[in-house]
Image: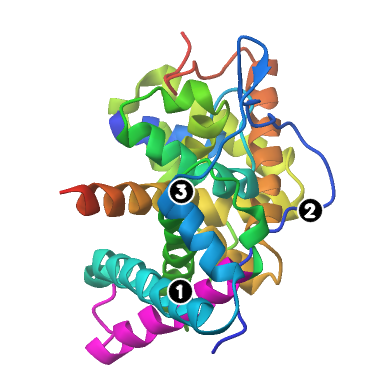
Amino acid sequence: MERDDKLLRALLGPEGPELSCEQCFQELDRYVELEVAGRDAATAIPGMRAHLEGCPACREDHASLRSLLDSSSR
Amino acid sequence: MSTATVTLEMPAVSFERVKPAPRAIGGTHVEHRPDSESRDWINALRDSGERREEAVARLHALLLHAARFEVSRRRAALPHLRGDDFEDVAMQSADDALVAVLAKLDSYRGESKFTTWAYKFALLEAAVKLRRRAWQGREIPLEPEVWPLFEARGSSPESGAEHSELFRAIQRGISHELTPHQREVLVATTLNDVPIDVLAERLDTTRGALYKTLHDARQKLRAHLAGQGLGLDEDGKEEG
């Protein structure tokens, strides 16, 4: 069932408005710094979380920047 | 130095999108000023002579660090590449990111550290290059050759009757409601796991343009399901 839900989410995408890939890239650095600082990044940048759910490539870019900043702060 | 810098250009058409939130607190616009270290970076990169050359060299080293980090993260998924190949990708990514960062210096708004802003260019360059390497020489499945698997999902006992109905409705929606291009993009990126940058390169378009197509296809599918009293809630669970 979990695999089915994952497939359904991929096919139907996120609910509600979302940023474009270009807007996501523009906001990515601010979003990740807010996350690292423990702030509410999703509220500060509406549509970002929905786009990261819907776009695997941007999701990977987000994970990479987050991981790089996390490793730099250790 | 490669000229194939990655871009995320959007098509010149509008579709349902949200504008990034205005930076305002209590109705007052908040100007973001870079921290002192970031200001030093910008000033040095806009300077001339030895100071700029030294800053450009430091920036390249920073970008190379980020590119190597990304290469290291993805290395396990590319067993057919050799150590030299990975270093070549990292160096080329740093070179291309340097060109992009210097060209876009005026777009840096000071809302994050300069180094964080610059890192994302190197990570993007490396990620796109490695995704393309992973798919080099592979045929991209654009047709729903996974229908048998998809149908199995829809009829498997563990899926349940409602899930089966939902999958059948989605399959009908993909076949009859989408344009051929929307169907190709949706099938390739969601059913066949083709990375969107790889598909964009093969179809000679941009990631942004393809994501818009994917977005439109998903909206059509949701509308198709809603018309039949089917759909998903915000958590991606089937509404009962």
Amino acid residing under circle 2: Pro
Q: Earlier in the sequence, mark 2 or mark 1?
A: 2
Residue at x 54%, y 45% (from the top left corner): B110
Q: Is residue B84 a member of the stretch shown in magenta?
A: yes
Amino acid residing under circle 3: Pro
Q: Which residue is mark 3?
A: A56
Stretch of the chain drawn in magenta? B78-102
- Horizontal side of B12 relative to B39 (left or right) equals right
Comparing A30 with B136, the one in front is: A30
Q: Which residue is mark 1?
A: B55
Residue at x 65%, y 40% (from the top left corner): B215
Amino acid residing under circle 1: Ala
User: Can residue B123 be spotted in the picture?
Assistant: yes
Q: Is residue B138 a member of the stretch shown in magenta?
A: no
Helix or strand or loop: what does disc 1 sit on? helix
Q: Which residue is mark 2?
A: B11
Residue B9 location in percent, x, y? 70, 58
